[in-house]
Every structure is written in C-alpha cells, then in structure tokens.
Amino acid sequence: MDVVTALDRLPKVELHCHVEGTMRPGTVVELAGKNGVELRTSDPTELYRYSNLDTFLEIFWLVQSTLGSREDWARLAYESIVDGAAHGLVYRETFFTPARHLDAGQDLADIVAGLAEGLAAAEGETGVRAMLIADIDRAYGAAAGLAMVKRLVELREGASPGAERVIGVGLDSTELGVDPTDFAEAFELAGKVGLRRTSHQGEETPPSHIWAGLDVLGSERIDHGLSSLQDPELTRRLAGERIPLTVCPNSNVVIANAVPRLELHPYRRMREAGLLATLNTDDPALTDLDLGREYQSCMEAFGYRWEDMVAIALDGVEATWLDESDKRELRARVEREAAKLAAELDPPR
Ligand SMILES: [Zn+2]
C-alpha cells in the first residue's frame, strides 16, 4: 500500500470543519432550485470558483442561503459525514453558523433538529460519530451572538430534538476590525451552562486576539491560531497548558491567502515549538479537499514521516471534547489501525 492510500484510511478526527463548507456543489444546485435562490451558473463544477477571501465569502454566503428548511439542514449534515467517512473520518465536532438564517426568520430549534437528524442517519450508516458546535458570526455583532446562546440554552433546557448534540459554542467569520471581547457575555453564559468554548482567532489577527480568546472568552481551543508563534509568551502558555489549535493549512493558503504556499506555512514550526496543533480542512467542499488529502499534502510539504502523521492523528483525539474513556478507546483504535496500515506500507516503515 502506498502512503497516500494509508493516510486516507488512517482513522482521523476533525475539529475545525464548517458544515456549510462541506456542501456538495450538486446539492447547492438542487437546493437553490428548490428554494428559489438564483445561481450565476447551474454547472456544479463551475460553482466553487473564487480568487480571494471576499469572493470566497460570497460563495460561502450563497451556499448558506440555499438552506431553507429543517430537511435541507438534515441533508447537508448527512452528506457531510458520508463524504468524510470515505476519507478516514471517525469523529467530528462540526461547526454550524446560523446567524444569517436566524436573521432571515428561521428558528434555531429547526436548524439544530435538522442537523442532528442528518448526523444520526449518517452515524447509523457509517459509524462516524459527530457532534455540533454553534458558531457566533462576528459580522452580526455581540447582541445577535448573545441571543443565539440564550436560545440554545432554552433548547437544551427544554430537551428540544437534537439539542443534546450541541456540545459547544464558537466564534467565526471576519476577524479584522472586530474586538473579540465584545462577545464576552455570550461566552460567559455558554460556560455557565456547561457548553464548551472555542473561537477562531489569529488567522488574520495578531496574538493579542488569541490572548483575548483564552482569557476573556474562556476558549479551551483556538481555531487557526496562525499568529501564535509571533509571541513567545503565548507560545509557552499554549504549549505548557496543551491548549489545542485547530489548524487548517490548506485553507490558510487557498482561502485566507495568509500564506503563499503550503511549504511556507508555520505548521511544522508550531508543532516543533510544542504546540498541540491538529490538522483540519475548514471548508473542504469549497476548497476541493478532504481530510485524507489534508494529511497527504501536509506530509509532503513539511517533510513528515508516517510516524509523524500518526502522532498528529493522535493529537487530534487528545484535542476533542470527548470524555476520557471515549478518548482512550478512540486513541487505541487509531493506534491499532495505524499499526495495521504500517505493516502493509510499501516501502515498509
Ligand atoms: Zn473556520
């Protein structure tokens, strides 16, 4: 077996993946037709063409706008897991960002119920487990963020269908010109009711935003964290406390244009500095990517060996919000499968 195939089959977890960013182009076309959303092309292969972050966000918003009902969310979640399973995904904590839909009058209860239905159906078919992280969209401001968390708390308390799948809150969308501390109240409420917390920081912003994510918002993980190494004290803190970073190297090149080429991405230096930096796809359908290829391209670009990639997969397990016994079980599974794959590798390792 070649290493490319082995990396595709290696059991992997993913902690930074937006469900909207997994939508198959064909599904966008179908849902757009069903919900009366106009597309500039009906050719699925033409749909995901963008040249920079702004045109990327236009497409991301277009994808979001095709989700009109509970069934649409269910279909999206289902296909997202089925597609991940084909490339070694075994567990995912998936972001969804409902601000745009809530603003347009959808109810969070329907969105959560739909997503949970789709995940459950895919779990039954593939064995891949998946949980949800409700992301606050920075672009909609602090009041909308707080309102979303309040509604989420209501749904949990009322045992609304699917609410038990939402295990945390996050913060995403545009970073520039937004003060992360604006969202302190929403994050405080989330923490109080036992929701886990993470936030996108340091993709386009300096280390001060990562500090704020940790100390003001109480984030247990940082999504991207690309600027971490610019601050030695921050690096020591992140490494010392094993605070996970959910890094998306290919996305940083293709979407944010934060790094010109994968070889120039600081991922390897981040790990060498002791950071718990995991590998993730961010928006795989929009970047023509899957988790297998994220691992393969990073192995090649950073000169990693098979053992390094297995260590990265195991760090992914450590960074999850699973309880300790589930983590142990998953870790054992990754180690077992990795040993089997290594024995079949040609040349052998
Ligand atoms: Zn992201």
Image: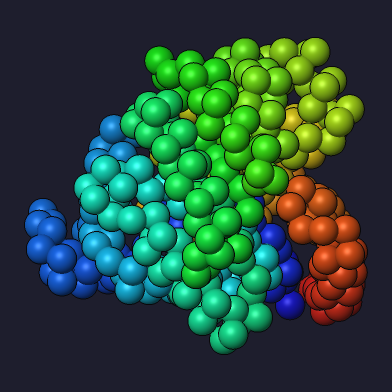
Location of the C terminus (image quadrant): bottom right
319 or 349, nearer to the observer: 319
Judge whether 242 appears above or below 184 on screen.
Answer: below
Q: Residue at x 51, y 36 (%)?
A: 171
Q: Is residue 258 left or right of residue 210?
A: left
Q: Is residue 22 left or right of residue 206?
A: left
Residue 180 rendering spot, x and y as whole percentages: 52, 21
Q: Residue at x 82, y 58 (%)?
A: 323
Question: Exactly how many numbered labels are in the figure?
Answer: 0
> Which picture quadrant has residue 74?
bottom left
Q: Residue at x 51, y 81 (%)?
A: 121
208 or 195, nearer to the observer: 195
Q: Residue at x 39, y 28 (%)?
A: 143
Judge whether 221 appears above or below 258 on screen.
Answer: below
> Which picture quadrant has residue 170?
top right
Location of the N terminus (image quadrant): bottom right
Residue 269 rendering spot, x and y as whole percentages: 75, 30
Judge whether 173 appears above or below 229 on screen.
Answer: below
Residue 207 rendering spot, x and y as whole percentages: 63, 16
Q: Is residue 70 left or right of residue 267?
A: left
Is any atom of residue 226 visible in this view?
Answer: no
Q: Residue furthest front?
A: 158
Is any atom of residue 242 visible in this view?
Answer: yes
